[in-house]
Image (spheres, coloured by chain):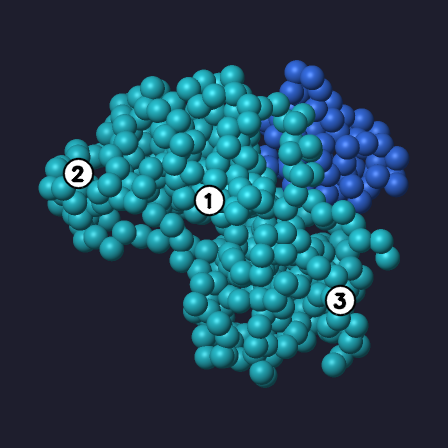
């Protein structure tokens, strides 16, 4: 081991930036190299499905990335960001990664921060008019397509959070929006059937249509999409389609190292990649156990996760490199928010784990007046969802999941 | 240290008030109020507040 170990971060988004910051905060003075697939410095993605589609002058991707770029701490001024050249292979025993352009980079410590990419529907048809939403290029392309006119017929495939947020934004812009979801109802897997039905009713009242229980089996059109064919045989005319059908993990570059890559990359509770030395993972590609709930490793696709996991992973990597591995328990409180028209959903804990849902305040027919729902698994409180409650309530709601700090 | 929140961006998510309650708070109307010149001993918490702001509206400068 060199006296100033070289840490390489693979990935160029929020998790990568937070990992670099936390390595510096943890006292690492040696070189840090960030290898990012995208051509831009890390930028904030949530606005891509909201304000960016709706507000102000449309910006070219580079200018948009610039506007959404994360503030960089002074401590990371000398971090070497090498962008636009994805890492495609690795040998974790030799401590080397290779980028698509063929350049090799050796490391003493490695941070896996490659995140996700959107899944595309495996349905043939014209490419024009079909969109996904993950990058500034995606958002720019969708916005450009929406400039074709007011009142476009838009089909959103997938009624998860991205799908519902996109549908809400597009409806607010005056388009005719239909959401198609083959499995369950909007966001049901996370928020449960009763709350899902209430939110669906609210979005429907604003003019968003939902077609549930059937998927897309074909696209109509020659040059560009003119419609979608549903599993039922019904045809929905469409000028624009947004595919919001989940994500794939960017782990191909880790193949051949004997890791568990069955769903993201498996780590221990301290974010160490299982089966490798001096390698940690951060963000939504990492599958880690959270003792707040149980010992089952899970990936968590929340915006708060890169920041939380980077804090732990950086401390772990620095401790391991120094021969003083930390062993205090990592138990982050998951949280997310979602803005859909005049609704704001705010979640703490893991509602998706629940087998029982209890409405604590408000009623499902009047979401705008505020709703508080708790989620329970085998009688234990595992999640909380607030709809349109004051942000002043959040601290208290979150603290219900924080464990008391053990006395040293 | 000088703290500035771009109030044209702020959407009252309240994450900053969880991270640094001595500096940021949500008032009874559900809107953000903050101390624009907190002591330097607050830096770590203010940094965290800036990190967790969903719309990245918090700026920190040396005073």
Q: Secondary structure at mark 1?
A: loop
Q: Position of residue B25 (x, y in %)?
A: 74, 26
| Outermost residue to the bottom | A94
Discs 3/2, front: 3
Q: Residue at x 65, y 27 (%)?
A: A393
| Outermost residue to the front | A379
Q: Residue at x 30, y 45 (%)?
A: A183
Q: Nearer the viewer, residue A153 or A63?
A: A153
Q: Residues within 10 Å of mark 1 (few under 14, many from 20)?
A: some
Residue A208 vs A354, above or below: the answer is: above
Q: Position of residue A373 (x, y in %)?
A: 53, 31
Instruction: Tell me the cyan chain.
Output: A
Residue A206 vs A166, above or below: the answer is: above
The answer for how far apart the CA atoms under marks 1 and 3 are is 35 Å
Residue A242 vs A313, above or below: the answer is: above
Q: Residue at x 59, y 83 (%)?
A: A94
Quadrant of the image occupied by residue B33: top right
- Chain ID at mark 3: A
Quadrant of the image occupied by residue A222: top left
Q: Secondary structure at mark 3?
A: loop
Question: Mark 3 vs mark 2: same chain?
Answer: yes
């Amino acid at each position: 081991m060199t006296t100033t170990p070289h840490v390489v971060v693979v990935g160029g988004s929020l998790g990568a930036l937070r990992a670099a910051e936390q390595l510096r905060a943890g006292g690492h003075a040696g070189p840090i190299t960030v290898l990012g697939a995208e051509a831009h410095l890390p930028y904030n993605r949530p606005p891509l499905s909201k304000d960016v589609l709706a507000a102000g002058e449309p910006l070219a991707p580079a200018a948009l990335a610039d506007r959404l770029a994360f503030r960089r701490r002074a401590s990371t001024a000398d971090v070497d960001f090498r962008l636009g050249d994805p890492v495609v292979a690795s040998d974790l025993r030799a401590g080397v990664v290779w980028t698509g352009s063929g350049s090799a980079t050796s490391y003493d410590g490695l941070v896996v921060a490659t995140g996700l990419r959107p899944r595309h529907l495996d349905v043939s048809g014209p490419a024009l008019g079909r969109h996904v939403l993950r990058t500034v290029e995606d958002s720019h392309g969708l916005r450009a397509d929406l400039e074709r006119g007011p009142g476009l017929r838009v089909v959103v495939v997938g009624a998860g959070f991205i799908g519902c947020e996109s549908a809400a934004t597009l409806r607010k812009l005056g388009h005719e929006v239909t959401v198609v979801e083959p499995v369950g109802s909007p966001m049901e897997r996370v928020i449960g059937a009763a709350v899902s039905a209430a939110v669906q009713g609210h979005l429907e009242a604003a003019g968003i249509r939902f077609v549930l229980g059937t998927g897309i089996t074909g696209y109509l059109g020659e040059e560009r999409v003119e419609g979608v064919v549903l599993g039922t045989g019904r045809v929905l005319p469409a000028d624009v389609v947004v595919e919001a059908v989940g994500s794939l993990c960017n782990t191909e570059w880790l193949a051949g190292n004997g890791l568990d890559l069955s769903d993201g990359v498996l780590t221990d509770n301290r974010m160490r990649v299982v089966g490798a030395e001096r390698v940690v993972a951060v963000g939504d590609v990492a599958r880690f156990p959270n003792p707040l709930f149980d010992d089952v490793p899970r990936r968590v696709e929340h915006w708060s996760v890169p920041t939380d996991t980077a804090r732990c992973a950086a401390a772990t990597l620095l401790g391991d490199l120094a021969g003083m591995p930390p062993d205090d328990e990592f138990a982050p409180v998951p949280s997310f928010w979602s803005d859909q028209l005049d609704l704001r959903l705010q979640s703490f804990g893991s509602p998706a784990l629940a087998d029982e849902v209890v409405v604590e305040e408000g009623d499902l027919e009047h979401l705008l007046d505020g709703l508080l729902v708790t989620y329970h698994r085998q009688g234990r409180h595992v999640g909380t969802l607030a709809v349109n409650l004051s942000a002043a309530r959040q601290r208290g709601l979150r603290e219900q999941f924080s464990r008391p700090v053990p006395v040293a | 240290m000088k703290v500035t929140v771009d109030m044209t961006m702020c959407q009252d998510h309240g994450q900053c008030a969880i991270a640094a309650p001595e500096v940021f708070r949500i008032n009874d109307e559900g809107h953000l109020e903050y101390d624009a010149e907190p002591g330097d001993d607050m830096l770590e918490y203010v940094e965290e507040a800036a990190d967790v702001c969903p719309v990245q509206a918090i700026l920190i400068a040396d005073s």
